[in-house]
Image (spheres, coloured by chain):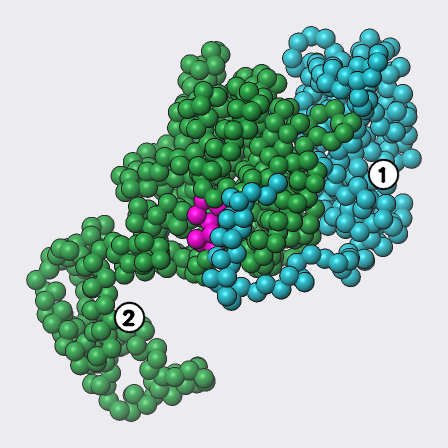
Chain colours: A green, B cyan
Amino acid sequence: MSDISTEKYVAEARRGIADPVLRRSLASLQERFGRGTAAAYLQLPEGPDLRVTAHAIREKAVAHLDVLLETLAATIRRNGGHVFFAATAKDAVDYCLEVARRNQVRLVVKGKSMVTEEIGLNPALAAAGIEAVETDLGEYIIQLAGEKPSHIIAPAIHKTRNEVADLFAAKLGIRRTTSPPELTQAARKALREKFLTADMGTSGVNMACAESGHITTVSNEGNIRMATTLPRVHVAFMGMERIVARLDEYEIILRLLCRGASVQTIGTYVSFVGGPRQQGDSDGPEEFHLVVVDNGRSRILADPQFREMLCCIRCAACLNICPVYGKIGGHAYGFAYSGPVGAVVTPLLTGVNRAKDLCRGETLCGACKDACSMDIDLPRMLLALREKLAYGDAAWQVEPASRIEGLAYRGWSWLIRRRTVYEMALKLAATGQRLLPRAGAMIRRLPPPIHGWTQSRDLHPLAEQTFMERWRKRKAPSNARVNSEWAKKNPTGEPGSEGCGGGEGLGDEDGRRG
Amino acid sequence: MKTAAEDRFFRRLRTALGHAPDLSRDATQLFAQGPSADELQMLDRIDGRSAADRRRLLERLIEAGTPINLRVVPVFDPAAAREGIAAVVAEKRPEWGEAKSVAAWRHPLIDRLGLEGALARRQVPLRITDPIAPGAGAGRECDRAQRDRQRAAVIASFIGVTGADFCLAETATLVLRNRPGQPRSVALVPSIHIAVITLDQVLADMKELFALLRWAERFRPEGLSNYMSLISGPSKTADIEATMVHGAHGPREVHLFVITG
């Protein structure tokens, strides 16, 4: 298993927020991609509802995962490829090491793949004495810098051109330059040597198609095509859920992937790999291996609350819109997957308690759901995780993160179902709040253990009189007037239902008028 | 080969699926038994395309190619394509080293161009990638030696010339299926990729492509082949401060000659 540092979320998030350079990069990333993706969905001939269609396609695929994977494996094997089903990260890594050992591999060129980050392939190759070079420019930069990706699609978004200039001058021995074209050219030259001499290439899988029997990879740089064309052996890793049944369905997913990931109508290179080189071919790998990784996914599949997460295609559109990711950056999430997708999938893959701050750090604003190319309800799952953290959950081995919080909510739930007790409590609180320090009309600080609430904002005090008290005090004729006006505007609504929900605000306005 | 570990993998998977009983498992809907009404209509539309329709597709292709730096050059006949390619060869400088050489597919359309003579006049060698002859019989070069020689020739070339199976106008996408004599590296390793197609190979979009590959009798047997690449313009990256740079790892330029006839 790769490094997991989800426990450091709060500290790392603070560090991210304090970094002005990172904040600027993230703001510009979100400005362009966040807005651009929304506009790109609108421009689809089918409109943004294509995401709903895509969701149904993915749900159907997930529901038939066994049939689809068997169909894919049978076709690839018929074409001379190998397929290995890995239950755990270790199984997947060990299989790859065994293939490398059998082929006397010394140098591996890697196409960008988050699942290889998830299973910790790089450290395992290094431990076996095999050099593994990341070839996506962003991944290459952070590998040279000894860091980890901070974005699924733009892994080096946290690096400035000045930092890259220093890094390349030191590690590649080139004249220092801050020009992106010159820096790109330097990497192109250095990596071309690696591509031409590597014995093995690895890649992820953006999506497989069961009907045609291919895995597909999408890239703009061409590095994945190089890594899967020139070396003698190609090993592709895929999360077991990354498959659709048919090509017409694939077409829809691909269009949304490219728009969600980078506001493109299509990535520069989309490659369909169905097996190794065939008789008479002059290039392509002699050996092709597909490693299908479970590593905790079957547990997600088994839980109806979370299996929707398996519809995810890791396009990273949610990162490009999330207000939390946009401030703290990707490193805080402490695992391969950052942003809203990371906040849901990381706890599920690595342990809910370990990664509890990830799902608690999100705002539930719902922007990720609107941006999601597969229309996945991430906020719903964030809430479901928080519920598990509040009350514990045996099936997911979740300990209640805070017994007090759980108790408090149980108490609250008990309280609001008892009218008279509730009103007494309100009275008590309205009196008690006078003791709290104020800033103008607002409450400045709450006492422990709820002082965190007012750490960065003031709290509106409870009204002197509750809404219900005012309501009762109003004269009968004006009551009737309000009721009849309400009924005119909302012919089917029930007067009074509004009163319960919007209590305080309504009461205030009412008070001023009266 | 199926192993015990694989059985366990699928048992766990099926148990997980069983734990979510509201999943609909209507496998009859999973794979298509034949073309849908939409697809049939698409196939008819492709077959019934007039010369004017094709011209319009070409205009769309040129329009889609512009923002992604794909140079689309409509030419009347193979001779004009040859001259256009020769001009690129003359004008551009090699990226790695000094000597110019060009690699080209063994492909019916490329063969018709007569590139060899045109490049010989400019003292630029042309390496044709012939299919690898099977076996290592007496006096015959063995597979590996043939392949190594071809690989070296492709690596040494600064321009690679290929055909394509189709081109999708909507996204300016070249579709290359794998065949002996038509290695994928020719469109990938040289710094400049030149593709040559005829106008009737231009399709509207990927939906049409998949309809043809799945259901048209003349394309169905080969299907997607064991390796199909979709190429939309030159290689690019925006990984350093989101600045767009062309020529990350693949070709930095792509020129597409469309023979309109």
Q: Secondary structure at mark 1?
A: helix
Of the pair A459 and A235, the residue shown nearer to us:
A235
* Number of numbered tags placed on the structure image: 2
**Subunit that carries the residue with mark 1:** B
Residue sitting at x 41%, y 57%: A381
Q: Quarter of the image containing the C terminus of chain A?
A: bottom left
Amino acid carrying label 1: it is Leu
Measuring from the top left, give residue A320's x and y in whole percent: 46, 44
Q: Residue at x 66, y 41 (%)?
A: A76
Q: Position of residue A209 (x, y in %)?
A: 64, 47
- Assess whether residue B88 is covered by the magenta stretch: no
Q: Quadrant of residue B30?
A: bottom right
Left or right of A31 on screen, residue B147: right
Q: Residue furthest front?
A: B4
Q: Residue A13, labelled with which disc?
A: none
Q: For the N terminus of chain A, which image quadrant? A: top left
Q: Give coordinates of residue A430: x percent, y percent.
A: 14, 70
- For marks 2 and 1, give the one nearer the viewer: 1
Residue range highlighted in magenta = A292-301
For mark 2, name the chain: A
* Left or right: A277 as drawn, with respect to A474: right
| Amino acid tagged 2 | Gly
**Coordinates of residue A26 in the picture (x, y in percent):** 42, 38
Q: Are marks 2 and 1 on the same chain?
A: no
Mark 2–mark 1 Cα distance, whole angstroms, equals 67 Å
Residue B57 seen in render? no
Residue B126 to residue A153: above or below: above
Query: Within the image, what quadrant is residue A280 found in?
Result: top right
Q: Which residue is mark 1?
A: B199
Which residue matches tag 2? A505
